[in-house]
Amino acid sequence: TLIMTLVTTIKDQIKDAMRAKDVVRLNVLRGISAAFTNELIAKKRKPDEELGDEDALAVIAREGKKRKDSIEQFSAAGRNDLAESETAELKIIDEFLPAQMERGEVEKIVKEKKEALGITDKAQQGALMSAVMKDLKGKADGKMVQEIVSKLL
């Protein structure tokens, strides 16, 4: 069996979305595809090369974060119509991201990492934060990790 890369999967799904006339899905997938190209250019690679899955995941996660930020801002401004469309887009993006960890699991990992590194005060918060984020790469929301780290120190 041929293992498909994330980039190939998204290209295939663009075709499916076109056939299904699913405008929202099509726009989101095209946006991700464009972000892949931008990432290649930013990394000084040719636009027709293919990103590896790890880089592709980072790009997709960034697209998801943009939607989350927009949802927060639109909700705060009382623009529920816009927040809803961003939420619909985020749902599509989430399909391609690894499942997010529960808060309890993240707290456990933060505690273990804190003990392993012997971190005892707020001054070392950055070191703990970066160590945890490296371990959880893409599996937990950075904001949640930061809240947990702050609470524990």
Image: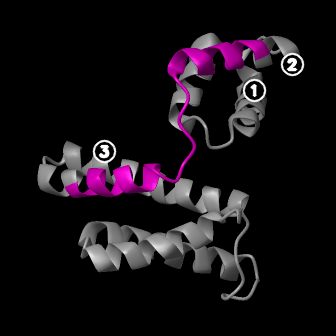
The residue to which callout 2 is attached is: 117
Image quarter of the N terminus: bottom right
x, y percent for residue 73:
28, 49
Q: What residue is disc 3 on? A: 72
* Left or right of residue 153, residue 81 in this image: left
Name the spot of residue 120 as percent of width and height, x first. Answer: 78, 11
Can the viewer see residue 79 in this picture?
no
The residue that appears at 22% across and 51% down in the rendered structure is 83
N-terminal of the pair, mark 2 or mark 1, is 2
Question: Could you say where residue 52 lies in the image, as x and y percent from the top left?
Answer: 73, 66
Q: Residues within 10 Å of mark 3 (few under 14, many from 20)?
A: few
Camera-side residue of 57 and 42? 57
Query: Residue at the location (38% across, 48% down)?
Result: 68
Vertical order, 109 against 89 (above or below): above
Can the viewer see residue 8?
yes
Numbered range of the magenta stretch: 85-112
Labels 2 & 1 near each other (Cβ < 8 A): yes
- Residue drawn at the location 55% of the way across and 67% of the way down: 9
The amino acid type found where label 3 is placed reads Glu
Q: How crowded is mark 1: few (under 14 residues within 10 Å), some or many (20 or more)?
A: many
Secondary structure at badge 2 equals helix
> Most extreme residue toward the front, as rendered?
1
Circle 1 residue: 128
Determine whether, in the image, residue 153 is placed left or right of residue 89. Answer: right
Label 3 sits on a secondary structure element that is: helix
